[in-house]
Image (spheres, rainbow, N blue to C red):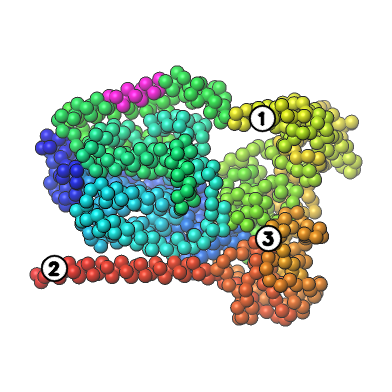
Amino acid sequence: MGSNEAFGTPRRPPASPVIDPEVVSGTERPPGDLPGWLGVLLTAVAPVAHFWQGTAGRIVLAPGDAVLYLFPIRRLAAQMVAQGYWPLWNPFVFSGFPFLAVSQTAVLHPGTFLFLILPALWAMNLQMIAAYVIAGIGTYAYARAVGATVFGATLAGMTFPFSGFMSAHLGHTGLVQATAWLPAVLYCAERLRHQRNVRWIAGGAAAVAVGIFAGHPQGTVLVGVTVSAYAGFFAIAERPPVGRWRYLRSCLALLTGGVLLGAVQLLPTAELVAQTFRARLTFAEFTSYALPIRQLPMLLFPFLFGGDGMTPYWGEWNLGELLGYTGLVPLIAAIVAVPLARRNLVARFWVGMAALALALTLGSATPLAAVGYHVPVWNLFRAPARAFLQFDVAVAVLAALGVSHLGPHRRQWFGRTALAMAALVACSAVVIVAFKEQLFGAQAERAGLDAVGFALAVAWYNPVVLWPVACAVVAALACLAVARWPSRLLLVAVLAVHAADLGYMGHRLLSQGFLRGEHVDVVPDYVRWLTSNGVTAGSGRVLLLTDGAPVRADLGLWDVAMANGYDPYILSRYSAVAADMTYFGAVSEAALLTRPGFLDLLNVSHLVVNVGRESWPPPRFSQRSLELILARGQALDFALPQPTAATHLDIVSSLLYSIRIADGTPVARVSVIDEAGAITSLLLNAGEDTSEWAWDSPELARGVAHRRAEVHESFPAGSFTGHRYLSRRSLPARVTVSRVRVEPLVTVQISRLSVYDQGTGISQHCTREHALLGDRARWESVFVGRRMQILRNRHALPRAWLVPSVEVHRADRILAAIRDGRLPDGAPFDPREVALVEDGPGLDGGTLDPEAAVQITRYEPNRVELRARTARPAFLVLSDAFYPGWRATVDGVDTPIVRANYVLRGLPLPPGRHAVRFTFRPRSVLLGAVVNGLAVVTLCAALTAAVWRRSRRRGPP
């Protein structure tokens, strides 16, 4: 094209770009371009400046999931290594859980080892900033490899790391650290297209392996799919300089080498996933967290649906999963690059990739989702909007190519494109503000946004609308100026406009949900109480009850073990036993209150209850809210903190699955009990005191057999409105209430319950804590702190115990016995007397001898040692989770471990005194380590051979 290019001249014909060392080093630059050193410096320094609060140590770069789970779990891994333990097993969550196999713990990632030498805050911030530097430098290098000028490569290197995908997923530590290597792997694949060299295979394989160790399998798959598509496209579209099959073999060796290097992580993770709900997803789960078509304007207005720290997010799913904004300057340049696809294969590939990725983000709105659901491995992951990874990379590369191929005859079109983009953004803003009710009114209503909030959220003066318009105008002017008068100063000005655009988005995202630096090592008061009272890993467990919010998974840092935790790979069996516990540790409160037997089985000695004061994350409901679903027979007592005078009883409730219940049918009995034990009972009737919550549903309205009671409050429920109903019942006389009892006769949801004194106008609201304390035989309040209250469980079983009898049943019957407290023959299930197993011989030992006992003598992450004595045959139950890889010996003799009580470990003991040892030695880890070692040896041998051959060709000096 000549030296009159606007932003510099590519060094190679765009149809087949290759690396030129002079171009990469910046020693020979076309006129008007930036110096190479400046491009590299800007790309490398940008993350340090962008995350300046983390650089300065003011915050931990771990928002959302990371602060609750990823940050503490990596600290715990390093702490275990420092104490001399291999982090193979985590005894501090879910009654024992794999450690290395849980990929997101990133035990083998280099960043985790930083915790061994640096304070936790700096270790976390350094590895996260490093990930963004790697993403930027990799993008810069790849853009240069495919023929971009220094300015174009710098623009790309400042786009991908701070794009919507990378910025919004900061809290998904492993995902960012895995996908940050994509440009570097692409760079190696591009080099292999022109020159087959073992060092590019080894370098790419190492990058893939480090991405695997980052701990996010979906991120690794996204990288692998993108590189595979890249290699396949260039092998088919043209004959690469090194040859088609040679190129494909090289790329296959790169990816295979990375997988083999990561085998020590992949094999244990695969073993774990097979035992979780993630072993297979439904189509609805597979397509969850997709970008709704109506939210496509977020590509131009990233905070249109809130989430900027000033307006709550009111769109579908959550903002972090749907953000793919790349900035307006790259979009303008990428559009300019589209015509290059006719003669430039790199541009053609990335135009196709951008279109495909954008279609994938839409989930079930396109046929691609139905196809992808049948693709092995790919169908194990949800969140289609994570295809924004490829979209953002594609826009960054196309932007680099677009500004690198602007001759004089195309400058005019570049200027017109910039103006057209500004006009598009401005017109879109006008349409959005003018027709917001028609476009987004229904969605705002479903999200619970009131009319005033909606009007403020989508107003022309709101930054969510005004800032993109202002950026579009400024970006258009900057592009027009640099196209007309190309100079280094104007090129830097364009980069500054782009940095301000993405910097604003990052600033809004960084303004919320971060742990302050000074709070990193603060020990909560309730944890101090637990540790000072001997509640440590080898004694009893705690269960955190946090109103459905994710639990913090860092108590292991202080040697406190939990029966819940936070991990997407929660064992499906364990979840079923623990009242259908979610992966973030929430339990069914109705089961906790009415069938708490599973707590005893799991050695839960203390319950830690969020009392809703100064809590983070904030509780979902206030203290006066219950939201408890009770089935028939699940009676519940509320013990008030002190006797309260009352003349009325207020109940906010609704019915579930009640369309056939006739008008006036009693649905619940509510009793108030005074100080003397006198009982006053009231009946709640359908159609008078409460009604079906979905009474207005078009599908149910004609079939509901009872009237609609007085509506207390309504809430959006998809295409209709759901209701809760208020019943205020007068008591026969003024009563001093000490307890309130609810006995449902059908399935009923109790949202609020309170006693009210008409004389004083004071209400006493019943809370979950009152319901727990209603079971006085079980719970005792032992601590009330600023945020948490601790209740002691008087019925908790010890960590290990002996039983005289063993019964063999099917797994489903054992689970039913644990849930219902009844054996299959109808007899009560007492885990102190009998253990339930799925295979092996039973045992009917009658009763234990008085001297029978078991004691834990050593309790470590990967080893448990006990001493037991019994005069008769007995069965030992250890209240730790059963998992493949655990081995047991009794007096030094290998003894098979039996799955007891559906999820625990057990083994038979003959009469006598015994030394029992449980040791965790998973074969998957050993096999993975062998494969990993062989891969390292093979790559090192190949590199050595390549160096030797090269030295022989050069000959003696």
Amino acid type, residue under disc 1 in the picture: Glu
Q: Which of the 4 image quarters holds residue 693?
A: top right
Nearer to the camera, 77 or 370: 370
Q: Residue at x 81, y 72 (%)?
A: 846
Q: CA distance from mark 3 to mark 2?
A: 67 Å
Q: Which residue is mark 3?
A: 811
Of the image marks 3 and 2, the number of the one nearer the N terminus: 3
User: In this rendering, is residue 518 above or below 907?
Assistant: above
Q: Position of residue 69 (x, y in %)?
A: 52, 51
Q: Which mark is residue 953?
A: 2
Q: Position of residue 90 (x, y in %)?
A: 55, 62
Instruction: Please state which of residues 885 and 522 is positioned toward the viewer in this rendering.
Output: 885
Mark earlier in primary sequence (3, 1): 1
Mark 1 secondary-structure assignment: loop
User: Who's the residue at 72% across and 36% down the image?
Assistant: 656
The answer to which image quadrant residue 763 occupies is top right
Specify the principal SS of the magenta part.
helix
Q: What is the magenta range?
A: 419-430
Q: Which residue is more in the foreground, 904 or 96? A: 904
Depicted 900 relative to depicted 552: above or below: below
Relative to 590, 670 lies left or right: right
Residue 511 makes an appearance in the image: no
